[in-house]
Amino acid sequence: MAAAGSGADIEVWQRSSALIWQLATVEGETVRRAVAISVLMWFGVDSVFSIIAGAPMNVLGNIAFAAALLWPLRPIYNVQTA
């Protein structure tokens, strides 16, 4: 059951990624914040229910997947040198 839920989560993220990138070009910081909050909410809920369902190893996959989703959202500061 937990694996099926995780598969559904991944499918939703894959299908919505194009929309997220299109919105990010218009409202970058707002979209960045919304995506980060949704990833963290997914991570918490999915990890808790994975543990409850007896699949604690799923949390390790969640950590890797959350890191892959959040890494591109980090602020990048362009420091120009003269």
Image (cartoon, grey):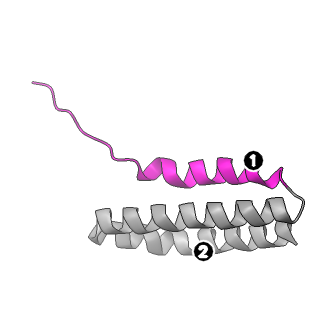
Determine which residue is flagged by label 2. Answer: 15
Q: Amino acid at mark 1?
A: Leu
Residue 40, by quadrant, is bottom right
Mark 1 → mark 2, Cα distance in angstroms: 23 Å
Residue 13, by quadrant, is bottom right
Q: Of callouts 1 and 2, which one flags the residue occurring earlier in the amino acid sequence?
A: 2
The residue nearer to you, when weighing 76 against 34, is 34
Q: Say the numbered circle drawn on residue 12.
A: none
Helix, strand or loop at mark 1: helix
Are there few (<14), some (14-19), or many (20+) residues within 10 Å of tag 2?
A: few
Give the residue at x 42% y 53%: 73
Give the residue at x 40% y 47%: 74
Q: Say the numbered circle drawn on residue 60.
A: 1
The residue nearer to you, when weighing 22 against 75, is 75
Q: Position of residue 77 (x, y in %)?
A: 26, 40
- In magenta segment, residue 46: no
Query: In the picture, which quadrant includes the N terminus?
Result: bottom right
Is 70 placed above or below 7 here? above
- In magenta segment, residue 81: yes
Are there few (<14), some (14-19), or many (20+) residues within 10 Å of tag 1?
A: few
The tally of labels here is: 2
Q: Position of residue 49 (x, y in %)?
A: 77, 66
Give the residue at x 72% y 59%: 47
Q: Which portion, as a residue range, is magenta?
A: 56-82
